[in-house]
Image (cartoon, helix red, strand yellow):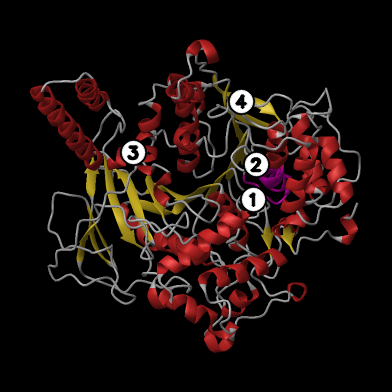
């Protein structure tokens, strides 16, 4: 809350608590009313500062048709004539945007176009269908407000709905035509394929703070059951991976339309966090198999990879069981298979979301989440079926093989890539109350059913039990956490994020035919629990002063200066480098990653003894660590909860950026997990030649 509002609320509270006279009560009420009015005004005027969607006004008529599957535009489009505002003309209509003025949060004024649709409404007959193109239009629409996000968090919300395939475009004001075509950055949001929306990344801030002008885009795609509902029935209907199809529709929209905004379709970078990074990884493989030029030239993958977590066939037992449970909760479990999706399209959206939430709640704690991308190519071992030809032409296969097989076969794009991870990726996912070694083993037994007893025994040796082993490095845990917290964090971080990220960098840097660089980072600034958690880097990368400025985090702002600068330079540079020109100087040079692992070690299981103590050769496995030693964010949060500086200590700014090599812990962990990657892909079985 800003200082003036805080003052008004405190004045009202003091008047209320001090047994005031009637005149004081009247004054307090006016102060409180004024504070509320000011808060509402601030909300509307600074939605981009905090990246909040402005609410839609009530529909008062006026002759505008409600968007349908054949008449599409922004939610309740309104004709306008505003020649002074930025405008673009597209085949689907003319769009009038707005200007975000320069301020302490935005050093340069930004043209903003919000809520522009890139495909039809996904409700009604289009529910559980591939995205449908928009019809041409010569109408003019206002692009002032964020469109609805796709149904997320498995709840009905006022700012979400099925008419959600829309995007937001940001560019520096006054740059169109003045500096030639600008580089383009497209953000793919995260959220475990079950939640999230495009505005989670403040792209207005990202573009405004960039050293060189660029066009920034974020967008929505379908998540949860509406975007990812794998099963054998879904495979026969040709409806797998709809959320990924939404993403590719957006990429094609950018290729066809971004020049109208001043963007260069030949210099597009796609950037994703978490599930967004997993998605980017799948696109690196999909576009490598086609003859058409990919719609992007570079990629940034924050805490994600194609080999991260689980990518099964749709007929994996987990998906089949979850699909049947979803249908049962939705009340259509007894419907004949050939009628299943027709009935699902007829259900009220609320019923779909209740079933989604019910299923999510059953599996969230074990991190065996429903509604995930799957290998969608027919395969005899998966008992999958070809899409029924009577239901129309089969859609293109998006994930044609186990991701690890695509890496082994070299079926991936060879373009500049930036990727990395946070030190403590697992903290927000693991059971915080786990106390015993049995709790540790049970977690991984549920997570990876293909784990054998010998796998679990090897896992224990690699991550020593802090309860029984005095030399375990996992004995220190945050307050109120179980004894296994740090141990589970390390093991899950390596399994789900860190080692998949390093595996991506290994394959790209070890490929002799790949002439493009790959850069690896680690984000280390700590937040909650004194750890660098999954997603903590997001506002730092965006240089989002709504967080950095309001909480007075000078050290983290310095980290943001370096981190955002590197991201922006990578995007602008056609060669894909995060480093500035030598004459500009930089605190630390970011070298391209050179894998310390022999090429075959990511192709087969590590058959030797997995132990610590091995470090890379000089020059191998180098990366940049951002924010080492910075704890400002966590200290500020704890003080807001009642902690004092004496209890926790003063804030530490840390080091904005420095070089480091892969650690012996990371090398040992990746040898262990790379040898078992297939237990989380396909049918979750180990290849005979790699069986230990």
**Residue 81, placed above or below residue 469:** below
Q: Earlier in the sequence, mark 4 or mark 1?
A: 1
Q: CA distance from mark 4 to mark 2?
A: 16 Å
> Residue 245 placed where, x, y %?
51, 66
- Magenta span covers which residues? 495-516
Q: CA distance from mark 3 to mark 2?
A: 29 Å
Tell me the SS state at disc 1.
loop
Single out the mark in the foreground, 3 or 1: 1
Tell me the SS state at disc 2.
loop
Farthest-out residue, left: 23
Q: Residues within 10 Å of mark 1 (few under 14, many from 20)?
A: some
Farthest-out residue, top: 646
Read off the residue under disc 3. Answer: 50
Q: CA distance from mark 3 to mark 1?
A: 30 Å
Could you tell me if residue 375 is visible in this image? no
Q: CA distance from mark 4 to mark 1?
A: 23 Å
> Residue 208 placed where, x, y %?
34, 37
Whether residues under marks 3 and 2 lie with C-beta atoms below 8 angstroms apart, the answer is no
Q: CA distance from mark 2 to mark 1?
A: 8 Å
Q: Residues within 10 Å of mark 4 (few under 14, many from 20)?
A: few
Whether residues under marks 3 and 1 lie with C-beta atoms below 8 angstroms apart, the answer is no
Read off the residue under disc 1. Answer: 367
Q: Residue at x 53, y 85 (%)?
A: 391
Read off the residue under disc 4. Answer: 479
Q: Earlier in the sequence, mark 3 or mark 1?
A: 3
| Residue 514 is one of the magenta-drawn residues | yes
């Amino acid at each position: 809350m800003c200082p003036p509002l805080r003052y008004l609320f405190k004045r009202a509270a003091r008047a209320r608590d001090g047994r005031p006279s009637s005149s004081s009560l009247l004054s307090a009420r006016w102060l409180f009313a004024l504070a509320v009015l000011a808060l509402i005004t601030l909300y509307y005027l600074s939605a981009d500062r905090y990246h909040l969607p402005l609410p839609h006004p009530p529909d008062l008529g006026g002759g505008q048709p409600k968007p349908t599957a054949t008449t599409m535009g922004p939610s309740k489009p309104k004709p306008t004539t505003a020649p002074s505002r930025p405008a673009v003309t597209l085949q689907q209509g003319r769009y009038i945007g707005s200007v975000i003025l320069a301020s302490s949060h935005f050093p340069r004024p930004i043209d903003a176009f919000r809520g522009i649709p890139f495909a039809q409404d996904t409700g009604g007959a289009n529910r559980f269908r591939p995205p449908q193109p928009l019809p041409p239009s010569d109408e003019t629409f206002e692009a002032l407000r964020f469109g609805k996000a796709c149904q997320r968090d498995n709840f009905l919300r006022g700012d979400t709905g099925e008419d959600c395939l829309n995007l937001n475009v940001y560019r520096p004001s006054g740059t169109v035509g003045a500096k030639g075509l600008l580089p383009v950055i497209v953000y793919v949001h995260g959220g475990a394929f079950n939640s999230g929306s495009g505005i989670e990344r403040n792209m207005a801030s990202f573009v405004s703070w960039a050293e060189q002008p660029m066009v920034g885009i974020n967008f929505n795609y379908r998540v949860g059951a509406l975007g990812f509902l794998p099963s054998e029935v879904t495979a026969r209907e040709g409806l797998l991976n709809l959320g990924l199809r939404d993403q590719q529709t957006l990429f094609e929209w950018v290729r066809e339309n971004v020049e109208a905004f001043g963007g260069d379709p030949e210099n597009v970078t796609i950037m994703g966090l978490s599930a967004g990074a997993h998605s980017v990884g799948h696109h690196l493989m999909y576009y490598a198999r086609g003859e058409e030029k990919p719609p992007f030239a570079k990629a940034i993958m924050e805490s994600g990879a194609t080999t991260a977590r689980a990518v099964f066939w749709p007929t994996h037992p987990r998906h089949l069981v979850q699909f049947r449970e979803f249908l049962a909760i939705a009340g259509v479990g007894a419907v004949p298979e050939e009628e299943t999706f027709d009935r699902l399209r007829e259900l009220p959206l609320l019923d779909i979301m209740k079933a989604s939430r019910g299923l999510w709640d059953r599996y969230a704690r074990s991190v065996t989440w429903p509604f995930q991308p799957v290998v969608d190519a027919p395969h005899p071992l998966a008992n999958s079926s070809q899409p029924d030809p009577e239901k129309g032409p089969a859609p293109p296969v998006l994930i044609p093989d186990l991701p690890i097989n695509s890496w082994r076969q070299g079926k991936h794009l060879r373009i500049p890539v930036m990727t990395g991870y946070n030190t403590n990726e697992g903290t927000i996912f693991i059971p915080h109350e786990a106390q015993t070694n049995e709790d540790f083993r049970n977690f991984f037994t549920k997570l990876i059913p293909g784990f054998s007893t010998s796998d679990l025994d090897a896992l224990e040796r690699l991550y020593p039990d802090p309860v029984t082993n005095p030399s375990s490095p996992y004995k220190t845990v945050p307050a109120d956490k179980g004894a296994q917290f740090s141990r589970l964090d390390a093991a899950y971080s390596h399994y789900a994020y860190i080692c998949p990220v390093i595996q991506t960098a290994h394959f790209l840097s070890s490929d002799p035919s790949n002439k493009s660089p790959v850069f690896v980072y680690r984000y280390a600034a700590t937040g909650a629990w004194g750890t660098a958690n999954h997603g903590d880097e997001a506002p730092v990368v965006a240089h989002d002063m709504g967080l950095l400025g309001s909480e007075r985090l000078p050290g983290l702002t310095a980290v943001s200066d370096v981190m955002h600068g590197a991201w922006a330079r990578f995007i602008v540079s056609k060669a894909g480098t995060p480093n500035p020109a030598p004459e500009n100087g930089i605190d630390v040079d970011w070298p391209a990653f050179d894998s310390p692992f022999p090429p075959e070690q990511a192709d087969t299981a590590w058959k030797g003894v997995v132990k610590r103590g091995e470090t890379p050769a000089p020059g191998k496995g180098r990366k940049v660590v951002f924010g080492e030693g910075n704890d400002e964010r966590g200290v500020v949060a704890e003080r807001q909860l009642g902690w004092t500086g004496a209890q926790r200590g003063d804030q530490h700014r840390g080091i904005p950026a420095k070089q480091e090599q892969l650690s012996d812990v990371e090398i040992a962990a990746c040898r262990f997990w790379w040898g078992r990657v297939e237990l989380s892909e396909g049918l979750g079985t180990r290849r005979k030649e790699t069986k230990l």
